[in-house]
Image (tube, helix red, strand yellow):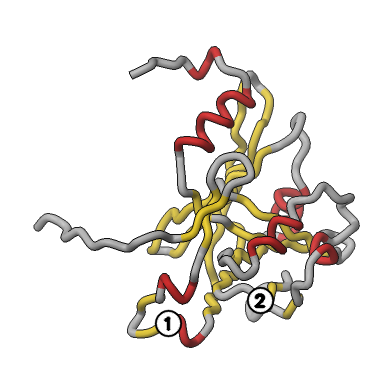
Amino acid sequence: MQPIDPSLLTERENYKFLTGSIIPRPIAFVTTLAEDGTVNAAPFSYFSIVSADPPLISLAIQRKDGELKDTARNIRAKKEFVVHSVDKGIVRGVNQTAANLPANESEIALTHFTPIESTCVAVPAIFEAKVRMECRLEKVIEITNNDQVTADLVIGRIVQYHIEEELYSNGRIDPHGLNAVSRLAGINYAEIGTLFPIDRPL
């Protein structure tokens, strides 16, 4: 094994090591609402479950030169957002929303996605996503390095689920029907491969 001290690596070198080794990563396609009513949309792969009781998820949103990204700024201001699962049918459109646009321009305009009203939050959702989760902000944890804030760890409480009816049966989601994709390193994505069961120890 080759030992590597992360403190001796640059931010980009650490990024490449982490995104190349922590794979596959689920993708959160997030919509938020700006103060002027612009619907912001962006994908994030620093994304995970925090808790089922209550249902909490986390998004780590990196800053650039200490500046908040639109998604983090909007979540802080409105305290609401919507997370969508990313499947193979929408992943190319989701990728388009990673473009750097001014805060008053909606990334959805770069896609063929259809904004729709949410049930419990004011933030619009995306019709084409097979699963979406309406969230309210639980808390934001600022991540610092050398006294500079480098990321915002957002914890969101899910207040409403939406799922395509044929995907959900007896409390379980059909992974083949969902056809979710995950993020790898660089420009690479992956589909779910062969599924195999392993019994948990008693």
Q: In this view, does 2 lie above or below 109?
A: above
Q: In this view, does 37 lie above or below 66?
A: below
Provide residue 171's location: percent of width, then percent of height. Answer: 35, 80
Q: Can the viewer see residue 58?
A: no
Residue 128: numbered disc: 2
Provide residue 115's location: percent of width, then percent of height. Answer: 76, 75
**In the image, what residue type sits under mark 1?**
Tyr
- Left or right of residue 103: residue 40: left
Q: Which of 102 and 156 is in front in this view?
A: 102
User: Which residue ends up furthest to the left in the rendered image?
Assistant: 202
Q: Tag 1's secondary structure?
A: strand
Residue drawn at the location 85% of the way across and 60% of the way down: 35
Distance, label 2 to label 1, CA atoms, is 17 Å
Residue drawn at the location 56% of the way across and 75% of the way down: 130
Q: Can the viewer see residue 151?
A: yes
Provide residue 11's location: percent of width, then percent of height. Answer: 63, 24
Residue 168: numbered disc: 1
